[in-house]
Image (cartoon, rainbow, N blue to C red):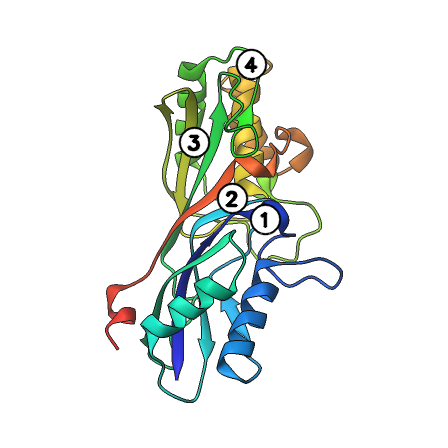
Amino acid sequence: MRYFIELSYNGKAYHGWQNQPDAISVQEVLEDALSKLLGESIEIVGAGRTDAGVHALQMYAHFDYESSLDSDDLIYKLNSFLPKDIAIYGITQVSSEAHARFDATSRSYVYRLAIEKNPFNFDSAYFLKTKLNLEAMQEATKILFEYEDFQCFSKSNTDVKTYLCDIMEAHWTVVDKEWHFYIKADRFLRNMVRAIVGTLLNVGLGKIPVASVHDIIRSKDRGQAGYSVPAHGLYLKEICYPQDIFNE
């Protein structure tokens, strides 16, 4: 039987979602907890991967287990067993063909930018001391919708077969003393959101004009795009699936 598990995590202590040979990952911690509680070796497949230090407000993964599960009981035990920076919200039986990664129809991220020094969010939002032009950043964001190939925002030496992404939503929102960049797409390249934000910040800082974003994207050159903003401000916000996946 196949099960989807819904969780969230604070990524500060982890070297990303995916298992690493010499560093702790969220996947490793969750697999270890499931294996001990279910009495057999459990492997999980995530909806995607997040880099070291990146957080997830919502992540899905699937695992296979031969017997029926008492979901509420397992959720309770997992939350008692797991460290405080990982929380489980749901475990749902799905069809044996359902796949946490390949069946996802969209993913969305939020990047939190602090515009005022705050002792309570220094490790959950990126504080930039310099004044920014939000209007210019909004205009530059609209340019993203005119393109599909985002190789310029992809981490170098990656093994992806295509750099095409369908961006569905992208905008900046003012939230108290923070500016939040929201972006939703069918898929994302490694480091893509952090590179986009770094490029938009260069626009907001007046380092490049809005129109230069066209040239950067067309160049397909990571060296032309902006810097990769710090991981601690990035959150995987939501992963969407066809509703019938959860109606097994």
Q: Nearer the viewer, residue 71 or 100?
A: 71
Identify the amino acid type marked 1. Answer: Arg
User: What is the distance, in whole Å, between disc 3 and disc 1 at their CAs?
Assistant: 17 Å
For the residue pair 248 and 169, the one nearer the viewer reads as: 248
Amino acid, disc 3: Phe
**Mark 4 neighbour density, 10 Å: few (under 14) some (14–19) many (20 or more):** some
Q: CA distance from mark 4 to mark 1?
A: 25 Å
Of the two numbered discs 2 and 4 on the same chain, state the one appearing first in sequence: 2
> Which comes before the other along the chain, label 3 or label 1?
3
- Which residue corresponds to mark 4? 205
| Quadrant in the picture for the C terminus | bottom left
Q: Which residue bears the numbered disc 1?
A: 190
Question: Residue 242 vs residue 121: left or right?
Answer: left
Q: Is residue 145 above or below residue 33?
A: above
Q: Secondary structure at mark 4?
A: loop
Residue at image point 65% right, 37% down: 222
**What distance separates the C-alpha of mark 2 from that of mark 3?**
20 Å
